[in-house]
Amino acid sequence: MKALLLSEYKQLEVKMDFPKPNVNPNDVLVQIRACGICGSDIHGYDGSSGRRIPPLVMGHEAAGVVADVGSNVKSFKPGDHVTFDSMVSCGECFFCRRGDINLCDSRMVLGVSCGEYRRHGAFAEYVSVPKHICYPLPEDLPFEHAALIEAVSVAVHAANRTPVVLGDTAVVVGSGMIGLLVVQAIRLAGCSQVIAVDLEDSKLEVARELGANVGLNAKNVDVAGEVRKLTGGRGADVVLEVVGATPTVQTAIECTRKGGSVCLVGNLAPTVEFPLQSIVTRELSVFGTCGSSGEYPACIDLLQSQAIRVEPLITAKGSLEEGPDWFARLYAGEPGAMKVIIDPTL
Ligand SMILES: [Zn+2]
Ligand SMILES: [Zn+2]
């Protein structure tokens, strides 16, 4: 089959004769129709994250059509439209059995090789995945929208982790791909005022188009001061941080009212400086959130009903052959680019 192989760091080639994956008894073989290039693929591409050790077929945000099923698979048949979790959970450990599949002790992410394992991903004509991570898609949901379900699920899980009361004010620090989905998810969760923060006006404009009431450019204004003005001098009830660096974490904490909650979604830096006394003396609740656990069916409904919109986030769609060029452009920081989708059938 055809596959986009990372043969060395920063070197991608289209292979015409990559081995088609095996279909084990519990597996579903999916013909990929859309696979998104993730920020983590870009960070892995040059070796800096250590999680894309070549040779590897990357790609974990995908959707397609069932091509074949293993002998134990009864719930899917060839021709069904499906998406799958980016993470293969074991289904048997303490955390999986509690339903916390994102915390699985032996989780493997598709399209990742990190020394402990190598699992080829979906920048290929076919990928084989266990049935328990597959979800049926409605036929009228475009594959390129379905390929964004993983990102949507991260935002929905973050909103589910954040204690919201109807009518709350939320601040979302960071209006990139995930931030723009968090803006939509936290509004659906019951926040009547959503304030988006970023350093780029163009992203704040998209945030407003997708439901933020206010966009604050941290380059031009004192974010915490502006948030207090919009909240009767108190600060926001909940703040979601979607960057993961010291200045943005500090902004998030400064924006939160006494007794409010901060949900940390971004994790760019391994450690950040934390204003301990501000958190302790103002009794803030701090939540971490990672991936998603069980939110895929809800996300499929939210996309189909357009309660969460993803089309403004899709920058371009290309073939496997166009993959190397898109990786190079995204790695170089292509201005205005958000999600690029690869369709191996093009
Ligand atoms: Zn991803
Ligand atoms: Zn597990």
Image (spheres, helix red, strand yellow):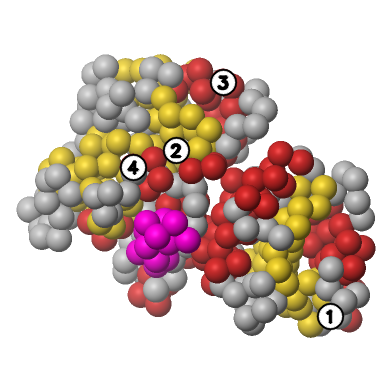
Q: Position of residue 114 (x, y in %)?
A: 49, 41
Magenta residues, start to end: 294-307
Q: CA distance from mark 3 to mark 1?
A: 45 Å
- Amino acid at the residue labelled 4: Phe
Nearest to N terminus: mark 3 or mark 4: 4
Nearest to N terminus: mark 2 or mark 3: 2
| Residue 295 on the magenta span | yes
In the rendered structure, find residue 295 and report the number of the disc placed on it. Answer: none
Is residue 173 in view? no
Nearest to N terminus: mark 2 or mark 1: 2
- Residue bearing the label numbered 3: 328
- Amino acid at the residue labelled 1: Lys
The quarter holding residue 249 reads: bottom right
Q: Of tags 4 and 2, which is closer to the observer?
A: 4
Q: Of tags 3 and 4, which is closer to the observer?
A: 4
**SS state under label 2:** strand
Q: Quadrant of the N terminus?
A: top left
Disc 2, disc 3: CB below 8 Å?
A: no
Disc 1, disc 4: CB below 8 Å?
A: no
Q: CA distance from mark 4 to mark 2?
A: 10 Å
**SS state under label 4:** helix
Report how many numbered discs are placed on residues in the image: 4
Q: Position of residue 209 (x, y in %)?
A: 63, 50
Q: Residues within 10 Å of mark 1 (few under 14, many from 20)?
A: some
- Amino acid at the residue labelled 3: Ala
Residue at horizontal 84 percent and vertical 65 percent from the top: 227
Q: In the image, is 37 to the left or to the right of 229?
A: left
- Residue bearing the label numbered 1: 258
- In the displayed structure, 261 sits above or below 251; it is below
Determine whether the beta carbon of the residue marked 2 sits less than 8 angstroms from the nearest atom of ligand 1. Answer: yes
Q: CA distance from mark 3 to mark 4?
A: 24 Å
